[in-house]
Image (cartoon, helix red, strand yellow):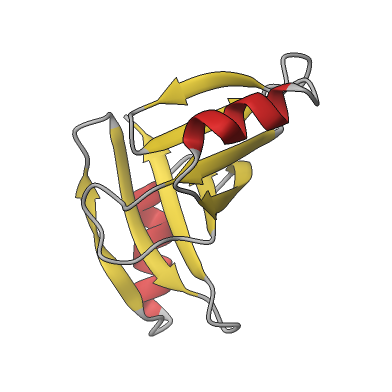
Amino acid sequence: MEIRRVVPDIRSEALEESRDFYGRLGFVEVMNQGWVMTLASPSNPTAQVTFMGPDATAAVHPDMSIEVDDVDAAYAAMVDAGAEVLHPLQDEAWGVRRFFVRDPNGRVLNIVGHR
């Protein structure tokens, strides 16, 4: 399984203000669903930060997103290890397949693959 990127997920009710603030550091908006927005470095597109209001389909807020090349294999590995799955593996309307799992530190990880 290959890790493609790791992105901090920051809970926010100030998406536009966050975009403007981080824009002063050189970040540009690369995705905006209204409730979740990702900013990236134009020169290094995998250097990203995500700001999220309430999640569209999950009851909990992730602390970090990890994009992998095979989300089904990642899910199977977590289930086999007995990890606590907080949001089931599912296809989302915005073109990703994802699940949430709690790490040993209590952090919620959004494990995601693009379809």
Q: Is residue 93 above or below residue 2?
A: above
Residue placed at 45% from the left, 60% from the top? 62
Q: Residue 39: which quarter of the image?
A: top right
Percent position of residue 84, x then y: 37, 81
Residue placed at 26% from the left, 30% from the top? 94
Percent position of residue 37, x then y: 46, 32
Percent position of residue 34, x then y: 33, 30
Q: Is residue 10 visible?
A: yes
Residue placed at 48% from the left, 63% from the top? 109
Q: Is residue 19 above or below residue 90?
A: above
Instruction: Tell me the quarter of the image containing the C terminus.
Output: top left
Q: Residue 114: which quarter of the image?
A: top left
Percent position of residue 95, x then y: 28, 29
Q: Is residue 68 visible?
A: no
| Image-based side of 47 in relation to 31, left or right | right
Q: Is residue 30 above or below residue 91?
A: above
| Image-based side of 68 in relation to 89, left or right | right
